[in-house]
């Protein structure tokens, strides 16, 4: 069975990743961290944007909120409480803003999500400014390996979540909604509830990832945690890799993290230009993404 | 608020409004005729600003002259983009169905490329130059010459475009495309040519707005983004595809921003702009001034 083969391949990948801290130095663990971060973020993003077609260009807001929660709670609560709390905060935010935001469709939704994320960033900056805090240093943050295993678990969870949702009745409902929302509503799919649930699920793990990454950088600075480049990278990875199944985001994230390691430190602008070029090329010439090109035979039947 | 401050702020609001109007006109035309969401629009403002800056620093050319060069450059860029990429977006029913969302991602990619190429070439350091900066007094309102010039040119161009859309045959064709694309084709409008012209016109006006902006504030490779957001607020507020409504909305936003910031603090400027942006999209995506919904 093909789905089993994919699952087995993914499991092998996970085990290989789990062994990385045992054999590699800090540099490669660091690269692994950013790879896992983007796998988790992009997989989560596809739960909403891949399945429903509601493209979110503001997913960094959940990541940033998770990071903010962790920065506020660090030192007060144990790590085991902070990570789930950050996830729940992101989920709560998604449900809160989801009702008004998800009424807006198509391209308006895309620019709206971007606006919401920027608004949240400037609100956090203003709040921190009022409190007289312009950045928060997080002392005694956990070691690189601890964070690596948490992120590995989150990336695996996000991949599993995407696969499970996609195979479920709920996932089929979301796909129907993507093709034609009115028709989906007519045949009895509770579109409002489904969209809200998808939005919430796609926010949960990014919130947790944010809490881990703020501990990795050991300080909180809103411009960095709410950086729109993160939203942009997620969308680009999903578009380039393809968001029709779990392989797309993996391919996209792997490719871009590699590219960023090669270029980010030495030539960040060239990295950004390449990111932009790839997005342009894929949107215009290959809107289905790389995964479809590389594994065309797997999409014969119902995906 | 005392009267001196009120007059001063009103003048500032008018200048900002005029520049927003000129910036947003192109975005509106592009959306109206082709359903393209150009999120790289503000980067054309940036390009226009850099043309003015370099023409002034290297050739000692007045921005009021070099804005012609900025317009030509942007129009050329628009034409290249139209032939190279945009035309492909209209092919095929699947692509056409997702045109708005795809065009947004496409322009987002272009925006990132343009911004970073500019940062690579010109460095990310903000730059500025002084031109026409003597102060004129009208009653108790003081205003610099460059702001007067920027205001006058922006208003003239906006009215010029309105007149062009109303009286010139090509302008009428653009309006026909905005209102009924299929019907326009039937009565013999050359859609390809009108679209190309719209892209060139839209890009050129944004670049001219940039040349005008460069006289009054600092410029940087990443200055375009706030203009993109402002232009979107304006065209959504005025009704998508409604050029007259957009111009009115631009002055409304200019006033809202100037007075809002003056009453609170400049730290809240971004919150104000993004707040209005989010609110307007959620509450009234068909626009405050536009009656009929052209979107969808």
Image (cartoon, helix red, strand yellow):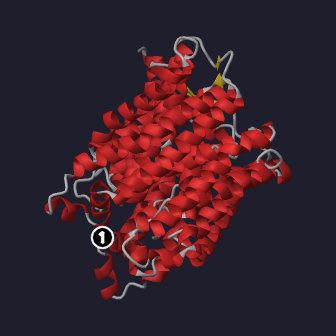
Q: Is residue B258 depicted above or below A42 in this figure?
A: above
Disc 1 marks which residue?
B179
Using the rendered image of the protein, determine whether residue B150 is visible from the camera's viewpoint.
no
Secondary structure under the numbered disc 1 in the rendered image:
helix
In this view, the residue in front, A104 or B174, is A104
In this view, the residue in front, B206 or A196, is A196
The mark total stands at: 1
Question: Which quadrant holds the C terminus of chain A?
Answer: bottom left
Using the rendered image of the protein, determine whether residue A300 is visible from the camera's viewpoint.
yes
In this view, the residue in front, A28 or A105, is A28
Q: Is residue B201 depicted above or below B229 in this figure?
A: below
Dividing the picture into quadrants, the one containing residue B284 is top left
The image position of residue B221, as x and y in percent, is 70, 47
**Residue at horizontal 46 percent and vertical 65 percent from the top:** A3
Q: Residues within 10 Å of mark 1 (few under 14, many from 20)?
A: some
Question: Which quadrant holds the N terminus of chain A?
Answer: bottom left
Task: Name the side, left or right, on which A153 lies relative to A267.
Answer: left
Task: Name the side, left or right, on which B241 lies relative to B81.
Answer: left
**Residue at horizontal 40 percent and vertical 72 percent from the top:** B174
The image position of residue A108, as x and y in percent, is 37, 53
């Amino acid at each position: 069975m093909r789905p089993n083969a994919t699952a087995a391949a993914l499991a092998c990948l996970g085990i290989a990743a789990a062994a990385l801290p045992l054999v590699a130095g800090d540099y490669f663990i660091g690269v692994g961290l950013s790879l896992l971060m983007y796998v988790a973020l992009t997989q989560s993003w596809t739960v909403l944007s891949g399945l429903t077609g509601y493209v979110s260009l503001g997913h960094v807001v959940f990541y940033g909120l998770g990071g903010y929660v962790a920065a506020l709670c660090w030192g007060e609560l144990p790590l085991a409480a902070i990570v789930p709390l950050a996830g729940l905060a992101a989920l709560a935010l998604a449900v809160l803003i989801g009702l008004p935001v998800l009424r807006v469709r198509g391209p308006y939704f895309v620019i709206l999500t971007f606006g919401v994320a920027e608004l949240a960033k400037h609100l956090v900056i203003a709040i921190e400014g009022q409190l007289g805090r312009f950045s928060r240093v997080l002392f005694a943050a956990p070691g690189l390996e601890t964070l690596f295993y948490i992120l590995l678990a989150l990336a695996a969870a996000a991949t599993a979540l995407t696969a499970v949702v996609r195979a479920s009745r709920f996932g089929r409902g979301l796909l129907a909604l993507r093709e034609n929302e009115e028709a989906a509503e007519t045949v009895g799919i509770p579109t409002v509830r489904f969209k809200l649930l998808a939005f919430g699920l796609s926010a949960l793990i990014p919130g947790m990832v944010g809490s881990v990454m703020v501990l990795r950088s050991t300080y909180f600075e809103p411009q960095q945690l709410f950086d729109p480049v993160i939203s942009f990278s997620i969308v680009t990875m999903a578009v380039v890799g393809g968001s029709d199944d779990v392989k797309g985001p993996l391919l996209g994230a792997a490719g871009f993290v590699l590219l960023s390691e090669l270029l980010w430190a030495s030539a960040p602008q060239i990295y950004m230009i390449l990111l932009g070029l790839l997005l342009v090329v894929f949107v215009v010439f290959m809107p289905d993404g790389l995964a479809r090109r590389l594994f065309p035979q797997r999409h014969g039947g119902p995906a | 608020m005392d009267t001196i401050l009120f007059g001063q702020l009103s003048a500032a609001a008018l200048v900002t409004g005029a520049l927003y109007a000129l910036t947003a006109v192109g975005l509106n035309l592009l959306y109206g005729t082709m359903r393209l969401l150009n999120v790289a629009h503000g980067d054309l403002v940036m390009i226009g600003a850099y043309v003015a800056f370099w023409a002034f620093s290297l050739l000692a050319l007045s921005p009021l002259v070099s804005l012609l060069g900025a317009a030509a450059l942007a129009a050329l860029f628009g034409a290249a983009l139209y032939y190279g990429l945009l035309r492909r977006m209209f092919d095929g029913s699947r692509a056409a169905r997702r045109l708005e969302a795809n065009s947004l991602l496409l322009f987002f990619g272009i925006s990132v490329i343009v911004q970073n190429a500019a940062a690579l070439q010109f460095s990310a350091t903000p730059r500025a130059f002084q031109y026409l900066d003597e102060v004129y007094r009208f009653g108790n309102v003081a205003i610099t010459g460059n702001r007067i010039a920027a205001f006058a040119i922006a208003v003239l161009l906006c009215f010029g475009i309105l007149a062009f859309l109303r009286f010139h045959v090509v302008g009428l064709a653009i309006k026909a495309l905005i209102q009924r694309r299929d019907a326009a084709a039937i009565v013999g409008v050359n859609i390809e040519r009108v679209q190309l012209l719209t892209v060139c016109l839209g890009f050129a006006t944004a670049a001219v707005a940039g040349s005008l902006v460069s006289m009054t504030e600092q410029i940087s490779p990443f200055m375009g983004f706030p203009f993109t957001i402002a232009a979107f607020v304006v065209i959504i507020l005025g009704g998508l595809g409604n050029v007259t409504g957009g111009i009115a909305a631009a002055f409304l936003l200019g006033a809202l921003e100037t007075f809002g910031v003056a009453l609170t603090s400049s730290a809240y400027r971004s919150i104000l702009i993004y707040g209005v942006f989010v609110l307007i999209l959620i509450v009234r995506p068909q626009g405050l001034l536009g009656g009929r919904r052209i979107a969808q």
